[in-house]
Image (tube, grey):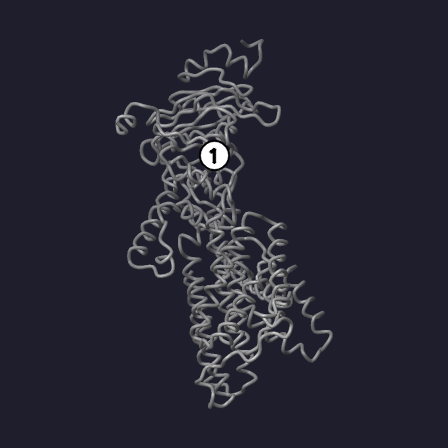
Amino acid sequence: MKLERNLLFAFLLLAAALPLVVGDQYLLHLGIMVLFYAVLATSLNLVVGYVGEFSLGHTAFLGIGAYTAAICSLKFGMPMWATLPLAALVSALFGLAIGAITLRLQGPYFVIVTLAFAEVLRLIANNWIDLTNGPMGLAGVLQPRLLADGSNLFGKQFYFYVALGLAACALYLAYRFVYSNAGRAAVTVRENRYVAQSVGIRPFSYAMRAFVLGAMLAGLAGGFYAHYISFVGPEVFTFSFMITMIIVVLVGGKGTLVGPLIGALLVTLLEEYLREAKELRLSIFGLIVVAIVLFLPRGLMGFLTARRERRGEISAAPAAPADVAVAREGA
Amino acid sequence: MNAMNHQSGPLLSAQKLTKTFGGITAVKDISFDLMPGEILGLIGPNGAGKTTCFNLITGFYVPSAGSVSYRGRDVTGQKPHAIAQQGIVRSFQKTNVLKSLSVFENILAGHYLEGRQSLLSTFFPGSKVRRTEAALRDSAADIVHTMGLSRRMDAPAYLLSCGELRLLEVGVALAAKPSVLMLDEPAAGLNSQEALAFGETLRKLRGTRAESILLVEHNMALVMGVSDRLVVMNFGQKLAEGRPADILANRDVVEAYLGKAHA
């Protein structure tokens, strides 16, 4: 708990210092994408790592957030500070509705139905031309007035700090949830539904909380994406975002808060560096993922904590055989 | 009037409980009362329907007929979590713990009901939440100690021995602060010496950490030594009920366990 909190603080502080040292637009763009994926992966991690079900439809919430922000911005001229919370709110409401259906399912059924929801939303985005402008997408999402006469570099710096603020917000909420009684209840449900019920936990309601929080954060990330790219099309619902999200969570380590950050950093940078390999890029990427799933099934963060545990165990080992662990005080 | 019920009536009462699975009747017309302050043993050969009884009382199964009442209120057919919230907490025959969590975390997780908080204070915990959390941690450490698992406090549950797991499971149930503690074969996998020590622990729990205990157990030395009364089941039906000494002398019971020649 302490270790995790300190690592999160260190990450945020380092990130905050980055624009002061780096004056390159391209590097700042990479930084923004790392933060964007960090928020997205944190939100998916709440579902995969804390509900314990694998959602393949998390892009639904990313897309809803992005479209909400774009529509509010273009049709009602709302500024970014209003569209972002709205994107989060609308996404959370969709999370409530979709969760109410999907969280009654488990295992492969959950996977398929969540995937179906994302696909249905993609079809709607493609075909409801009046609202979404169909495959053409919504272009020219309003930029904050502040940026109108600033340089491009200033724009990047501005978005970097907005993304950092969102990441801090997402991590704070996730941290509070995970280390609260509600988070413990969610983990109890994930680990063993029967134990959860027998100590008074209603499994559905805690899975729901983690799911809705995840939806909300994904919506927030989507809203940010809409403003930053200033264009939203149906591709926000496609599987490629989902794949990146999954890789980030798996590489970093599901069920930990630091994992998605490490994952986001690694995957974003790797994607950029592998660009030179062109068509080979995705194949190399796939191999790396296969290797991680095979050799580090709990991700990089799981690998690190396992090492710490093993060291602790060795020092505690001599005591173990004598400890038959029966209450003998009364005997 | 309610207060009088607490004094005189049974804490938990099963009336004519019946459960059928398709054409098979697993439990038929089982009735028994658990009195306040009592340790009641539920025994019988394998397949007699003891665990089914547990599942019926705790809401994991819905009875085909009959009723369960708790402190005079009907709780038949309620959901497992709702029944647990009223103070009836069980353990499982097939050990169920949170495998990847440490012993301490397992027991802390069991404190769920005590630690419940509003959505707002989940995200913005104040001093009240911090005090509650500290109290829960103290209580969890205390239960770890009571169950004799102090030295395994921070060990992940998957590293525990079979006997330790059973103790941990009882600890998780205790963490939910039960009035009625229902244990399904808690001593399975313990050697005879460990089982006796476990019996001592159970006696200490009664009246301190749980008002009454309902116990399913195959270890006769343990269940005879610790129970105030016994209910014997065979083929889904109640065979006998009474004090341990009387049960031992009961011809039907001896026959069910050892066969006719011994009776």
State the residue position of label 1: B59
Side (left or right) of B224 relative to A238: left
Quarter-of-image position of residue A166 = bottom left
Side (left or right) of B65 relative to B229: right
The location of residue B236, given as percent across then percent down, is: 54, 21
The quarter in which the N terminus of chain A is drawn is bottom left
Q: Nearer the viewer, residue A304 or A243?
A: A243
Q: Nearer the viewer, residue A317 or A99?
A: A99
The location of residue A326, given as percent across then percent down, is: 43, 37
In the displayed orientation, state which residue is furthest to the right.
A279
The quarter in which the C terminus of chain A is drawn is top left
- When the figure is inspected, residue A121 is found, relative to residue A189, above or below; the finding is below
User: Label 1 marks which chain's residue?
Assistant: B
Q: Amino acid at mark 1?
A: Gly
What residue sits 31% from the left and 52% below the top? B132
Side (left or right) of A331 relative to A263: left
Helix, strand or loop at mark 1:
loop
The location of residue B133, given as percent across then percent down, is: 34, 53
Q: Is residue A14 in view?
A: no
Q: Is residue B59 in view?
A: yes
